[in-house]
Amino acid sequence: MRQRIALLLLVGALFASSAFAQKKKIYDPSLNGKKQLLEAVTKAQATGKNVFVQVGGNWCSWCIKFEKFVNFNNDLGEILEKNYITVHLNYSKSNKNWDALEQLGFPQRFGFPVFVILDKNGNRIHTQDSGYLEKDGGYDHDKVKRFLENWTPKALSAESYKDKK
């Protein structure tokens, strides 16, 4: 009897911790998107990084899938950490962040998530439809890596190509 109770308690604890982990929110609907972008650009200027904007919402399974994917693949997480200030820009019924999306050129037209790259001055340099980074019901490691590497400050620097003239 005690073993059954212990087993039930263990299963209950595992279920509760799993449910808690699933409730972790990537996007904060209470945040002002324009303010998020301004803060990210300020940090980018101070660090020489670009800004990686992931537009989506906690309702979006592909948004959550992408977040888990880059966190699971250490090399992708390192590329993001080294080269970008990351912003999770919320789009939901409660907060569509219209002003921020207007500033970014209305990227929601590509669906969700959509990725926008800003340079350190806040200029939009690329908008990426995430569908092109998918493969077999998930994200393709090589496509995501190539995308992230192609928009780093180093990749956009003329210094990177001087010896190739």
Image (spheres, rainbow, N blue to C red):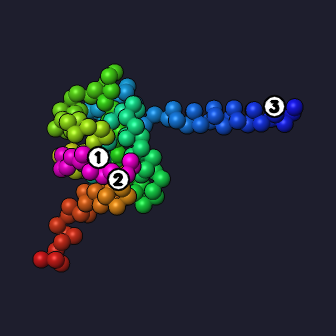
- 19 to 161, vertically: above or below: above
x and y percentages locating residue 80 in the rendered image: 37, 54
- 60 to 154, vertically: above or below: above
Task: Give me the residue at 51% from left, 32% from top.
Answer: 23
x and y percentages locating residue 16 in the rendered image: 63, 32
Q: CA distance from mark 2 to mark 1?
A: 11 Å
Range covered by the magenta-colored residues: 124-138
Q: Is residue 149 visible?
A: no
Identify the secondary structure beneath mark 2: strand
Residue picked out by circle 3: 5
| 65 inside magenta stretch | no
Identify the mark nearer the N-term, 1 or 3: 3
On-image quarter of the N terminus: top right
x and y percentages locating residue 73 in the rendered image: 45, 56
| 137 inside magenta stretch | yes
Residue picked out by circle 2: 135
- Which amino acid, mark 3? Ile
Q: Residue furthest top?
A: 94
Q: Is residue 81 left or right of residue 17?
A: left
- 120 to 8, vertically: above or below: below
Q: Nearer the viewer, mark 3 or mark 2?
A: 2
Residue 130: mark: 1
Q: Is residue 132 visible?
A: yes
Q: Nearer the viewer, residue 37 or 19?
A: 19
- Which amino acid, mark 2? Lys
- Which amino acid, mark 1? Ser
Q: CA distance from mark 1 to mark 3?
A: 47 Å
Q: Nearer the viewer, residue 34 or 132?
A: 132
Residue 9: mark: none
